[in-house]
Amino acid sequence: MNMISVQGLHKTFNKTIHAVRGVDLEVAAGEVVVIIGPSGCGKSTMLRCINLLEVPTEGEVSIDGADLMDKGTDLDLVRAEVGMVFQSFNLFPHLTVLDNITLAQKKVRKRSKEDAEVEARKQLERVGIPDKADAYPRQLSGGQQQRVAIARSLAMGPKVMLFDEPTSALDPEMIKEVLDVMLELAEIGMTMVVVTHEMGFARAAADRVVFMDEGVIVETGPPDEMFSNPKEERTKAFFDQILP
Amino acid sequence: MQQLEAARGRAHVPLKRRAEEEAWWQSAPWWVGIIVAVMVAMGLKILFDEDYDLAWKNIIPGVWITIRSTIYIFLIALILGLLAGLGQVSNNVVARNVARAYVELVRGIPILPLIFTLALVIIPDVSAAVGAENSVPNDWRAILALALIYGAYMAEIFRGGIQSIARGQTEAGRSLGLSRRQTMRSVVMPQAARSIIPPIANDFIAILKDTSLLSVVGVLEITRRTRQYSASSFKFPEAFFTMTFIYLALVLALSTVLTLFEARMTRDRAGER
């Protein structure tokens, strides 16, 4: 069974803005899918529909067999299995890095303080900033903050990780440190859906690239094929604009 | 050139700008001295003038009632305000509209007429309607009336504080699997507290001062006692100056305590925003 299954997804804002117009997307366990497309094409909205941060206007979304559109499904439980990394990090500014990472472990996973801290330090080690446990988010660089955000999600032991333009708010020299962490995750077999403008990452890590425009999936395929030999005119036009 | 010199008034005196440092007497907090002087003068008057001492003895039993009313009103209003504030940002249609209607109704009516209406009509009628006629003593009608009024004011403070926290914070909490309630308590509220505490402290002081309005519905607090004493003794200046001295002392004491508390609660923890 597929880890993520999205079928016939529509999302309309205020009954007028039709952001997503019928998207089907299946993601297998361990697969890395990169979603690209011009600004405002609905890719972020689509991603946010996967963990129901946006409630779809129409369509089906299921994660690891759990139907998210079913009102009987406990969304909080499903969301604990789906890590989300935001463009603007969204760390909790009133908590230290360690408390940022242990909060949901304690409240949702019901882990003891000690267990949660052990897990938090393990994840901080993985993202390469074990010495920042006691710092406040504000004291960190953008790249470090984003790595803490990734560690915070990983500490929940998610089955899926969603990334919503994780490097778009970063200075150029910090983009690499975040992408390196993401590449490592891809290598160990994490199921990932990544909305990004980083074509280098797509080339290196993606099993499949999805090109979206005007709320629909225009074309999908392995990265080499997509980049070197896009079939659709719109895809070609997009690459012509962004690739050197 | 000549014109310029003429404009300066005197020739050959270079005009240079200089950053002016304030002298100590310019930056000293004289206003503290003035208030202390007023307080000391009034205090001495009460200590050594028999007429003032008599006024003081007649008014002072009201102080306890004023303080007690202030504390009850503040605590009840705090709870009402929190509930109505959360209600206004709730997803529940009923809760949202009830909270909104309560806040708008109270804010649309001046305090004094509303105290009359609540304390003399609505609260007795409601208690009678639920079969407990005359069950609310007069002081409590007045306390509940002002608590209902300040509850609505505080609701706006809570709502504003909660809504000032970026939406991304809630999204981050929810996407980690925290429930709405957990996100509100562990993520939003601690951050909102910083902007909520100062205006709430402000309302605490306002409540202390507005307990004087309860005198109109027969609560024997400071103002009521002052009016009774002055009307029977015709010692108006003695009674009214003593009354204002007591209020000022109470407000200064409370605001000092609250300033210290605020400083503790909103102190920058290392590096926090």
Image (cartoon, rainbow, N blue to C red):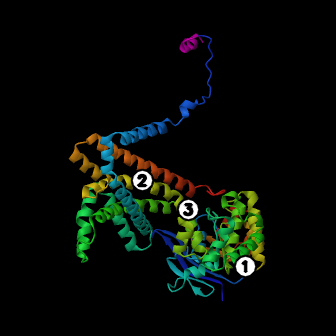
Badge 1 sits on which subunit?
A
Q: Circle 2 sits in a helix, a strand or a loop, which is it? A: helix
Q: Which residue is mark 2?
A: B205
Q: Quadrant of residue B82?
A: bottom left
Q: Along the horizontal axis of the image, is B234 left or right of A57? A: left
Q: CA gap, disc 3 to disc 1?
A: 33 Å
The relative height of residue B58 versus residue A151 in the rendered view (above or below) is above
Q: CA gap, disc 3 to disc 2?
A: 24 Å
Closer to the camera, B49 or B273?
A: B49
Residue drawn at x 24%, y 69% as measured from the top left: B124
On-image quarter of the N terminus of chain A: bottom right
Badge 2 sits on which subunit?
B
Q: Amino acid at mark 1?
A: Met
Magenta residues span B1-10
Q: Circle 3 sits in a helix, a strand or a loop, which is it? A: helix
Front of the two marks 2 and 1: 2
Closer to the camera, B179 or A187?
A: B179
Badge 3 sits on which subunit?
B
Q: Residues within 10 Å of mark 3 (few under 14, many from 20)?
A: many
Q: Along the horizontal axis of the image, is B127 left or right of A61? A: left
Q: Along the horizontal axis of the image, is B34 left or right of A186? A: left
Q: Amino acid at mark 3?
A: Gln
Q: Which residue is mark 3?
A: B191
- Residue A78 locus on image (x, y percent): 59, 81
Using the image, tell me which numbered label, if any, was put on residue A190. 1
Disc 3 to disc 1: CB gap under 8 Å: no
